[in-house]
Amino acid sequence: MAGQHVVFIASEAAPLAKTGGLADVVGSLPRALARLGHRVEIILPFYRRIIEGSGFAPSPTGIEIDMWADGRNWPCRIHELEDGGIRYLLVENDALFDRDGIYGPPGGAWDDNLLRYIVFGRVALEAAARLDALVDVLHCHDWQTAFIPLLLRTQYQHHAPIAQARTVYTIHNLAYQGVFDAGWIHRLGLPSHHFHAEDYEFHGQINCMKAGIANADAITTVSPSYAREILTPAYGCHLDGFLRRHRARLSGIVNGIDVEHWNPATDPCIEAHYRAGRIEGKRRCKAALQEACGFEIDPKRPLLALISRLADQKGIDLLLANAEEWARREHQLVVLGSGDPYTENMLAELAGRHPARIFFHRGFDERLARRIYAGADIFLMPSRFEPCGLGQLIAMRYGAVPVVRATGGLIDTVVDYHASKARATGLHFVEPEPAAFDRAVTEAVALFAQPRIWSRIRGNALRRDSSWDASAEEYSRLYRRLTDGTGT
Ligand code: ADP
């Protein structure tokens, strides 16, 4: 079966530039697609100080593209680099993209984000059109690149080298829709005849995500459960009715992780290596983490961990409501995260009151994250909603048993102890209430105290196949359906 030519267009990709799970997906799915024989390029903005700061040195391709928007020209140059066998094309315009944050200063957003990503999207289309082979599929992600399918259908419909491409639009998180003032339509020259309720208009404003949903040849989201949930008012973020009208093109494909990048048998950041069946190294990782946190070093003490953006979605309030009681029960709790300043302060205060039991590190730190995944017994994910979630996949890979709220991708990836004692990889709780979360954690701690049961659950988690292989096959079949003309 001949491979397809697929171009990912996205606003972040690990390891070049990352704020969350979107970057992990864009950084790892293309490699799995390439292993299946597809040709894949990734087009990203050139966030110069962030990308160069991560140690990458892209080189110019010589391609220069002028883009008119908001009353002036934005000259862009295309750079390239290769990482992990994948070619990246980076759109350079320092005024737009070389800033201290990807989307804004800490906790904020740049005022001109729509301008930045519309210029980026148009330049990305022109760069894709100049590749040495015709593109079969343009795969766009989240609100930042959601206008691309519409631009392709309208302003680029006669642009010969790219007009034939089919489009896939993936929703990584429906909560971030990219809503902007309608005044930008004129300033950016967006197709105004599509500004209506069945396209990108939303209560008189521009809604980027609606443009993607209305115009892409296929819409995906990152787990089958989330694909069902977003059709309901409880999870639909005011787009459930709109999504129901487009459900024939919507499917859910669960995320994977790069199992080489996340591998406790080789991870250079952790104290000792281990794998399923040879678990001794995990004990040393736990002792090292306990020591680093200033906790008592005791293998029998349950060590709970949470690594997350500190946002409403993540249910940190459920943790805050229980943490003091867990400290009283002499559990140990490590939290790594940044985001909402109120939550950061609450966590810092808690850790200050219980330094021997609760440790909080404010910030984004992948090395520390790895040491926590490796050292923890129980990984907490009390999300109010979770499109897929990667934390629980990494945690299972590192033998930290997840306790998760039964929502979205957490349902699809963690086998609940109550559903199957033999196949369990973690525990679920249903109501987004502190008491329900506490019951699940209490039960996990009780199971942890029973070594035979715990080693079975932990072994199941360690052996779970969280690689991209199966999901890359699903994307592959979707691309094929689209380009065969049988997919819409
Ligand atoms: P989301 O994309 O909603 O933030 P996911 O669970 O899909 O959540 O992905 C989160 C990713 O970001 C995981 O790889 C997780 O390890 C990582 N991460 C989150 N917060 C931090 C942090 N403070 N430091 C290091 N890594 C983090």
Image (cartoon, rainbow, N blue to C red):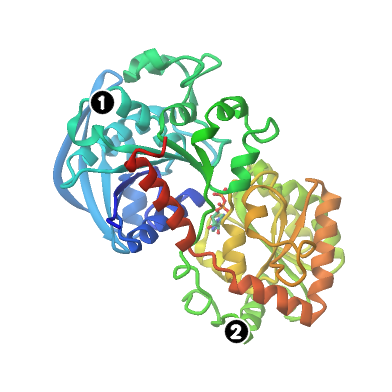
Crowding around mark 1 (Cα neighbors within 10 Å: few <14, some 14 to 19, many 20+) is: few
- Answer yes or no: disc 1 within 8 Å of ligand 1: no
Q: Identify the image quadrant of the C terminus.
A: top left
Split into quadrants, the picture shows ligand 1 in the one at: bottom right
In the rendered view, would you say 166 is above or below 289? Answer: above
Under tag 2, what secondary structure? helix
Residue pictured at 29% horizontal, 55% vertical: 3
Among numbered discs 2 and 1, the one appearing first in the sequence:
1
Residue pictured at 30% horizontal, 56% vertical: 38
Q: Is residue 331 visible?
A: yes
- Identify the residue position indicated by label 2 in the image: 281
Q: Position of residue 171 (x, y in %)?
A: 50, 40
Front residue of this view, candidates 112 and 464: 464
Numbered disc in front, either 2 or 1: 1
Q: Identify the image quadrant of the N terminus.
A: bottom left
Q: Position of residue 383 (x, y in %)?
A: 68, 48
Crowding around mark 2 (Cα neighbors within 10 Å: few <14, some 14 to 19, many 20+) is: some
Disc 2 to disc 1, C-alpha distance: 57 Å
Q: Quadrant of residue 445?
A: bottom right
Q: Position of residue 350 (x, y in %)?
A: 76, 55
- The reply, left or right, for residue 136 in relation to residue 175 is left
Residue pictured at 36% horizontal, 26% vertical: 150
- Identify the residue position indicated by label 1 in the image: 157
In the rendered structure, are the residues bearing label 2 and label 1 in contact, judged by CB atoms less than 8 Å apart?
Answer: no
- The reply, left or right, for residue 187 in relation to residue 164 is right
Q: Amino acid at mark 2?
A: Gly
Under tag 1, what secondary structure? loop
Q: Position of residue 83 (x, y in %)?
A: 30, 61
Residue 394, numbered circle: none
